[in-house]
Image: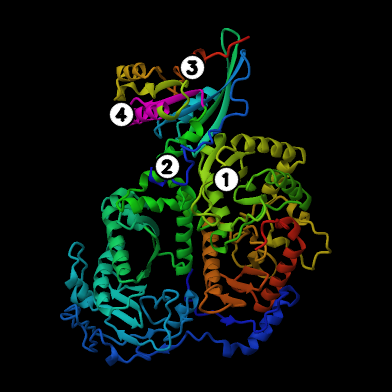
Amino acid sequence: MSSDSSSTSGGEFTNPNPSPNSTSKPLEDQFASAALTEPDNEPPEIQESPNGVANGSVGENSHGEIESNEREGAVGSNLEARQSVRWRRTNSEVEVEAPSSPSSSGYAGERGSSSGSGSSGGFDMIGGGIGGGDDEEIQEVSNVDSIQDSQASWMPGKRHVDEAKERGQRGIYYGNIVMIEVGVGNRDGEGFQCSTTISDPVMVVVVLVALVVAVTMVTELVDDASLSWRKRKKHFFILSNSGKPIYSRYGDEHKLAGFSATLQAIISFVENGGDRVKLVRAGNHQVVFLVKGPIYLVCISCTEEPYESLRGQLELIYGQMLLILTKSVNRCFEKNPKFDMTPLLGGTDVVFSSLIHSFSWNPATFLHAYTCLPLAYATRQAAGAILQDVADSGVLFAILMCKHKVISLVGAQKASLHPDDMLLLANFVMSSESFRTSESFSPICLPRYNPMAFLYAYVHYLDVDTYLMLLTTSSDAFYHLKDCRIRIEMVLLRSNVLSEVQRSMLDGGMHVEDLPTDPLPRSGTLSPHLGQPRDSHESLREPFVGIGGPAGLWHFMYRSIFLDQYVSSEFSPPINSPRKQKRLYRAYQNLYASMHDKGIGPHKTQFRRDENYVLLCWVTQDFELYAAFDPLADKAVAIKTCNRVCQWVKDVENEIFLLGASPFSW
Amino acid sequence: MGCSSSLPDRSSGQLAGLNSENGGVSDAKNLRVKLVLLGDSGVGKSCIVLRFVRGQFDPTSKVTVGASFLSQTIALQDSTTVKFEIWDTAGQERYAALAPLYYRGAAVAVVVYDITSPDSFAKAQYWVKELQKHGSPDIVMALVGNKADLNEKREVPVQDGIDYAEKNGMFFIETSAKTADNINQLFEEIAKRLPRPASS
């Protein structure tokens, strides 16, 4: 999604008066009041300092020597000695920074417009937690690409320090946070930036050199055999802290040993200084790092997803690994730092690739909530009752699912299941074909429940899409669980739950076209739209007129905060191709990240318009609503429509949510 | 495997394992036995079971997770029936420490290797030793060289299998789950070798 839409109309609104019972206060009112205060609520982080040296006093830097030299192309003495860092500025490109604001923008959408002049995409967010205090100094140590002049063509293979110098470096010393931008401008003058926490400018030089090499490897690449490898838009790697490859999304991880070693060198080097590298930006590539004890996870992406999203994805990948092995795998590294973990993950490639694929279609991966299959209240109750029965007999969790949607689930007393664990478990079961062949009994770990211990999962498919998972702590409970399953299956068949499930799968969920114009008379049934078979919408190609729901509503997602569940409308034209759906999810993901940026504070509402959509987000204590409209949609009408969506969800919550599930008491 | 500490401790006293409630034997005419398949990943354990139980063969490899449970009953000529309760274990290294959970109390262990892979033959020997140390003392063991249809790619000579089986008091057979060759024979032979409960 393009983030630098200049037509972000309305900017951001804050609800000055969040009402605890938010549905009682229509969204219009919030917008109305927000609009009045809009000028004051201009995000503080968009402060442009003409040359980036806003508050910094150059002379006070005790570590490095800063030379400001306007002459272009003078590169010879950069990075000369380890003790002195000389930086040259070759132009006065506007630097945008948020001086001393711990709440700097993490929101790509803002960034785009505020740093529109920066050809290299503006500065990214700063690593969390260590944000600059008031006494931080900001110094610009800037030197922008002189490369185009000094060296016309990039020659792979000659990557050493001199070249790094010639490519030019630009960085900002930000208290103990350093943001570096290095022009490796071989192709289109793109630079790279790094957000890390490095306290010593001398080290910056060293890291810079390593980063130049690494980013070159990332963009230039490494596995010479495979051109296709480097064309991939999004790579994920897992490696050990000794640099041993563990997993690579593309290509043979063993062939990437050199590459892994380089990543390891960067991470370890920065770690040795007591710092952490979190993000490197190289043009439109982002390299995101996540360190989990002896395990390093790295994502290299040019998808323009926000840092928080990519980091969340790495967390999920790590969680998936724990689900298979538990955290006790760390002990292998304690015993033998050079331990090769790949055999332990044998045969699980498909689990990871399926998880990574879900990052682009399953909103649960960033909403941290699960979704239910729409079912009549009584049907879900019937399923829940028999599961509860079983849970009382010593089963820790009993979960009945249809694909990635929950039919019902029950936990033993006080046991609660995190939505992320459910996502990872469902992904594991659905991607492992062998579960479909016969009943299975297999150790799994729920990382959010207990990352150190295995549970035992009895898994059985009741039909093609519907499967039952019974989790227990006891390794010899198989025959008991098998008996439980037979009982459950009998009850489900007798009470027609399975056929209702099949029907719901065919009918789909909420369709925006069916958004009721007036609040439903509390009939509380989905049948007005669920009964209708979906017609083929292929003929409706015209993108902007008269399709989707009322007022140009194209899609929505509603996440209930208490229930940890979300409901998402079915895709309708014009969001009818997988590519468009993925783009919309990416847009939602951006929206989610911006709404949850801890630095900015709780945003209540947000209205954005770009060439693709109008996006509207509304966050209250009870729920979050994300809605996409036709880009020409009228704002006031869109807001009204969102209120209707909320009302609609409330009206049918009995059917779309699992209510009163006892374990969900947090 | 190093990360086994959270796995069931094989030296612990709880030997219940995955025995069926009644210890496996019903009566003299109708035997019920627990059978476990062990072997390296990719040797075709699941394929053997699916061929035996469902008469199917699926060439696309589906990695087994944990262990799958299937059962199949066969009738012998002496009009007894044997119901095999089969634990098809995953061959992956991470499940190795978990194997006792499945072979504990098993009356039959079928150790499978791939005749085109010497590594898998070595792994089979590892499992035999493991069973001799930790399995039931009167366990019936079969050594199975699978993928016999790939004879042109054979790397483990038949004689090696025969010799090793003989030395360890095992029953030996080469099978092909793909062509169904010797699959039923394998299970019939096992059934014949089962100790019969004294019919009184």
Tell me the magenta residue range: B106-132
Task: Indicate the chain on which mark 1 is placed.
Answer: A
Disc marking residue A473: 1
Q: Nearer the viewer, mark 1 or mark 4?
A: 1
Residue picked out by circle 4: B118
Task: Indicate the chain on which mark 3 is placed.
Answer: B
Q: Quadrant of the C terminus of chain A?
A: bottom right
Residue picked out by circle 2: B94
Residue picked out by circle 3: B190
| Residue lying furthest top | B78
Task: Report helix, strand or loop for mark 3.
Answer: helix
Task: Indicate the chain on which mark 4 is placed.
Answer: B
Alpha-carbon span between mark 1 and mark 2:
18 Å
Q: Is residue A296 shown left or right of residue A606? A: left
Q: Is residue A145 visible in this depiction of the protein?
A: no
Task: Report helix, strand or loop for mark 1.
Answer: loop
